[in-house]
Amino acid sequence: MAKMVAAVIVCVLVLALDITAGILGLQAQAAQNKTKKVTVLFIQCEKPVYKAYQLGLAAAVLLVVAHAVANFLGGCACICSQVEFIRASINRKLAATLIVLSWIALIVGFSLLLAGAMSNSKSKTSCGFVHGKTLALGGIMCFVHAGITIAYYVTATAAAHEIR
């Protein structure tokens, strides 16, 4: 019973961190959208927004913290060989698949949030190719990361408690 309560607490914590990161990413994009922009063809000039920089950076940090919590507390669901994969239970196979997907979601989300935040870290107006909605996409990836990571944690915990 105590393990179940701990698992629920970990899931709620990861969910709260990821949702907060996603909301911060979306708010950073909203702050960035309020600045004046001049676009000619594919070249866009805009002033950086320090608030978007702060919110984007905070979202990236929370995303990494959520990932670290789930991975450290979820344990290792590694499958190192094809024979081990064939013999593994469905929970272990699913956990191994989900950990890979959670790393992909982390890398994509973190990269988008960091790219969006860094584009707002300068103090001068910058011009370049239109880079779209990187902060919003990074925020959305935080929500995707939440679902995948919680599913990983649940399956990894279930696999750890199986009788071998």
Image (cartoon, grey):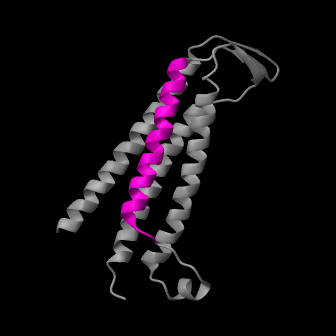
Provide the residue span drawn in magenta: 50-76
Depth check, front residue: 43 or 117 = 117
Residue 82 sits above or below residue 8 on the image? below
Residue 52 is one of the magenta-drawn residues: yes
Left/right placement of residue 4 relative to residue 74 reads left
Q: Position of residue 17 (x, y in %)?
A: 38, 43
Residue 162: image location, x then y, percent:
34, 82
In this view, the residue farthest toward the right is: 41
In-image side of 60 versus 161 (left or right): right
**Hey, which residue is sitting farthest left in the picture?**
1
- In the displayed structure image, the side of residue 154 where residue 133 appears, left or right: right
- In the rendered view, would you say 56 is above or below 11? above
Query: How many numbered discs sit on the rendered protein?
Result: 0
Residue at image coords 49%, 26%: 54
Quadrant location, the C terminus:
bottom left
Residue 153 x/y as whole percent? 39, 63
In terms of secondary structure, what is the magenta stretch mainly? Answer: helix
